[in-house]
Image (cartoon, rainbow, N blue to C red):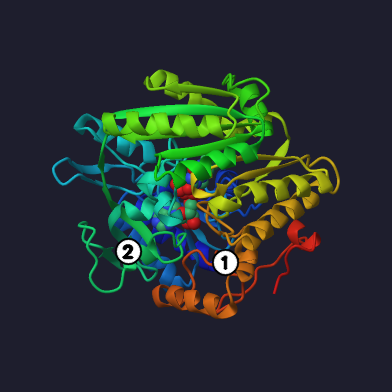
Amino acid sequence: MTTSTEALVPRLRDICGAGNVITDPLELRTYECDGLTSHRSVPALVVLPATAGEVAAIVTECAAAGVPFVARGSGTGLSGGALPRQDGVLIVMSRMRAIVEIDPVSRRAVVEPGVTNLSVSKAAAPFGLFYAPDPSSQVVCSVGGNVAENSGGAHCLKHGFTVHHVTGLQIVTPSGELTWLGDGTGVTTGYDLLGAFTGSEGTLGIVTKIVVKLMPLPEVVHTLLAAYTTTSEGGRAVSDIIAAGIVPAAIEMMDALSIEAAEAAVHCNYPAGAGAVLIVELDGPASEVEAELSVVRAICEAAGATEIRAADDPAERAVIWAGRKSAFAAVGRISPSFIVQDGVVPRTSLGAVLAQIASLSEAAGIRVANVFHAGDGNLHPLVLYDDAVPGQETAAEKVSGQILDACLEAGGSITGEHGVGVDKSRYMPKMFTSADLDTMQLVRCAFDPASLCNPGKIFPTPRLCGEVPGRRRAPHPAVAAGQAEIF
Ligand SMILES: Cc1cc2nc3c(=O)[nH]c(=O)nc-3n(C[C@H](O)[C@H](O)[C@H](O)COP(=O)(O)OP(=O)(O)OC[C@H]3O[C@@H](n4cnc5c(N)ncnc54)[C@H](O)[C@@H]3O)c2cc1C
């Protein structure tokens, strides 16, 4: 612990109570990483506030002492966004998990940031309503984390991302001021600061309350599973469905390797020998869904489906979804380690980029399983390796970086929903010019001129606001592989 953080301990104990300030080195290790376990850093201190007032008081103390701070929700992030600072305070929001209000008339909810995503829909269900953004981690990830990452999910194709469902945020600014962005109506006057804040990965302040829209539960939901010999056949079905003017709630695809992993983990009983499966979900008024279902079925058949299954019963639909929902974790069954990549390509380039990924995988001798939000062109290649085999991690990092290069060449993006965090800051100069990055940094500096709020994330360092590069013990595998440079 540094002198500055040590001096903070008594003051933070006064604010949150002694039991909610963690200083024990072993307990601190619990918080050393998020879902991206290849980056680890033990925080100097962890605090668990219970109210917005406590968060404001903690941040005020940090700002006065010049100590960096990082917010953490449930720690499921996959880009190292909640990676703590060794010289800083980690502010964990998990005690702030109240659903403050469900207003069925205005169709909105007010929630605290630590509440889990799925709890909001559960609380809204008795009123015939639900909260639409549904990351696959929704059982555990927090709504505060969702706001920071502008999280998506399988059903964002039709219903939109977090930013489309947040109408008000109570935040603590990096200097410790408690204030509101947006008035809860969804109408913006002046600059859209609510939009700027959503997706800012915890770098512009800390969210302490969230107003979200609730949507009416659909009258019917139909889920269709189509099996294909190749992913390119499945990709053709995706393009044809959208070209027919149909926007399903979700279109997801899994390739042979991810099907194999899911089968081993949850016995999802997908069609034997399938090279790809497509899951298409339609929701809405019964007459509309029935009409669309027959068109989608015909398109899937025309694209070469070897088998089609359909379900409208919740239990049967859950069986179809089981394989897809378990896919990330399931890959752990077939590989000791893996990288969850997140990139975006135009839907029309899906087939070509998947073919490119297959060639990269073959050339490097590194297996890649593909499971993705096909409707959005949001790929999640899972790059498999064995960290016990010398050189494999570096080779996997190299393939992972080449996949992002392929996404950019196709006119896509280095991330669709998992954020930039620490992991992808090195790729930002490949997607944006220096002038773009400096402009973004100006926004950041307007909120946080002292660079204390989650520093070292999103942007390659050093840039403005006095950010300095951190010390590295060994070259990062991406640097060793010639994929990135530190500057
Ligand atoms: C198995 C699995 C499946 C996933 N599926 C999806 C998916 O389908 N779609 C998707 O988008 N993501 C997905 N994710 C990624 C992850 O779950 C999301 O990014 C999620 O929003 C992170 O929420 P969290 O509470 O865990 O945040 P954390 O990991 O704790 O933090 C994430 C970022 O948010 C910031 N933050 C947290 N709370 C606050 C706050 N109150 N105020 C300000 N900043 C804050 C942190 O500083 C950090 O930068 C998945 C992850 C896993 C492990």
Residue projecting furthest to the left: 105
Can residue 71 be seen at all in this image of the molecule?
no
Label 2 belongs to which residue? 194
Question: What is the distance, in whole Å, between disc 1 and disc 2 at their CAs?
Answer: 22 Å
Q: Residues within 10 Å of mark 1 (few under 14, many from 20)?
A: many
Asked whether 431 or 309 is in front, the reply is 309
Residue 261 visible? The answer is yes
Q: Amino acid at mark 2?
A: Leu
Q: Quadrant of residue 246?
A: top left
Under 8 Å from ligand 1: the CB of mark 2?
A: no
Identity, as a three-letter code, of the amino acid under mark 1: Gly
As drawn, is 407 to the left or to the right of 133? right
Left or right of 446, for residue 44: right
Is 8 drawn above or below residue 467 in the view shown?
above
The quarter of the rendered structure image containing the N terminus is: bottom right
Q: Tell me which residue sits at (49%, 24%) in the image.
A: 320
Q: Secondary structure beneath disc 2?
A: helix
Q: Residues within 10 Å of mark 2 (few under 14, many from 20)?
A: many
Instruction: Name the residue rendered at 57%, 60% in the picture.
Output: 85
Residue 244 figure quarter: top left
Q: Which residue is mark 1?
A: 456
Left or right position of 379 against 208: right
Q: Position of residue 336 (x, y in %)?
A: 73, 35
Residue 459 image-quadrant placement: bottom right
First along the sequence among labels 1 and 2: 2
Spot occupied by residue 50 in the image (x, y as percentages of width and height) = 33, 48
Q: Is residue 428 above or below residue 360?
A: below
Q: Residue at x 81, y 44 (%)?
A: 362
Determine the secondary structure under disc 1. Answer: loop
